[in-house]
Amino acid sequence: EAGGSVHHTILLWPLPHLIVAISLAAASKRLGKAGKPVMWAVLGVLAISGILLTDEYYTRMRRNGGSESWTDAIFRLNTYVAKVPAKSVVSMDWGILEGLRFLSYGKLPLVGADGRISKPELSAEDREVATQIVSDSGNLYIAHTKEAQIFPVNEKFLKLAAGLGYRRDSVAVIADSFGRPTFEVYRLVRASQ
């Protein structure tokens, strides 16, 4: 369960890279005196290629902003949430909880709800936990806006809350430095209120 991206696989399985390095070292020995200069040249090409690739990503990020999961809106969100009283701050999507925990130095009362609610079918225990989260009026909820969401957990949660007689009361929408709405902060209130 380490994730689906290639970088997770590389972190878990560095052996292919080790094999390539050993093969290149062996090849350099077979080249005799020319081995070291050839390997330094290969290393130089790889290093320059890596620097150019990093520069390309940096240029795109500066021009277009980060992706939904890596956004500078997390800084504004942290500043905002630190000022709002809440018993618990409930993260409703992937990529919110860890950023806030880091930026607040662990001082925010953070709870991650996405893992409990994102299952295709909720067990009785999952429903009980979700009901407890919904019914606590001291909770503050943070979700990505519909355009920026990573996993559609929030809609499922709001349907569950509506079934229990609650509705979303939007408190704030936090935008990134490009003005794109990224996070929604809300509370749940009784539908009759």
Image: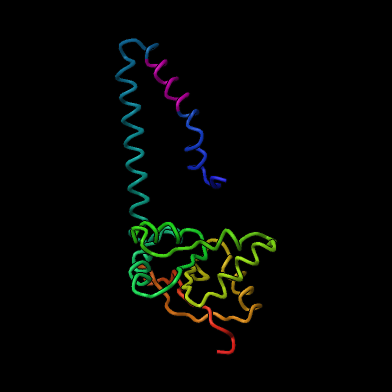
- Where in the figure is residue 136, as x and y percent of width and height? 53, 74
Taking the image as shown, residue 106 lies to the left or right of residue 186, namely: left
| Labels in figure, total | 0
**In percent of the image, x 63 and y 81: which residue is there?**
165
Question: Eyeballing the image, is 53 above or below 15?
Answer: below
Q: Is residue 106 above or below residue 176?
A: above
Q: Is residue 68 above or below residue 87?
A: above
Q: How is the image coloured?
A: rainbow
Chain part drawn in magenta: 18-28
Which one is nearer the viewer's eye here, 7 or 101?
101
| Residue 163 percent across, percent down from the top left | 66, 78
- 103 inside magenta stretch: no
Determine which quarter of the picture holds residue 173. bottom left
Query: Quarter of the image holding residue 72?
Result: bottom left
Please say if 129 is above or below 172.
Answer: above
Asked whether 51 or 103 is in front, the reply is 103
Q: Residue at x 39, y 71 (%)?
A: 175
Q: What residue appears at the point 50 percent right and 59 percent down from the top-left corner?
A: 94
Which residue appears at 64% of the width and 67% of the height? 128
For the stretch drawn in magenta, the main secondary structure is helix
Image quarter (top left, top right, bottom left or bottom right) of the C terminus: bottom right
Please indicate whether residue 147 sits to the left or right of residue 160 in the image.
Answer: left
Q: Nearer the viewer, residue 110 or 73?
A: 110
Residue 19: x and y in percent read: 47, 23
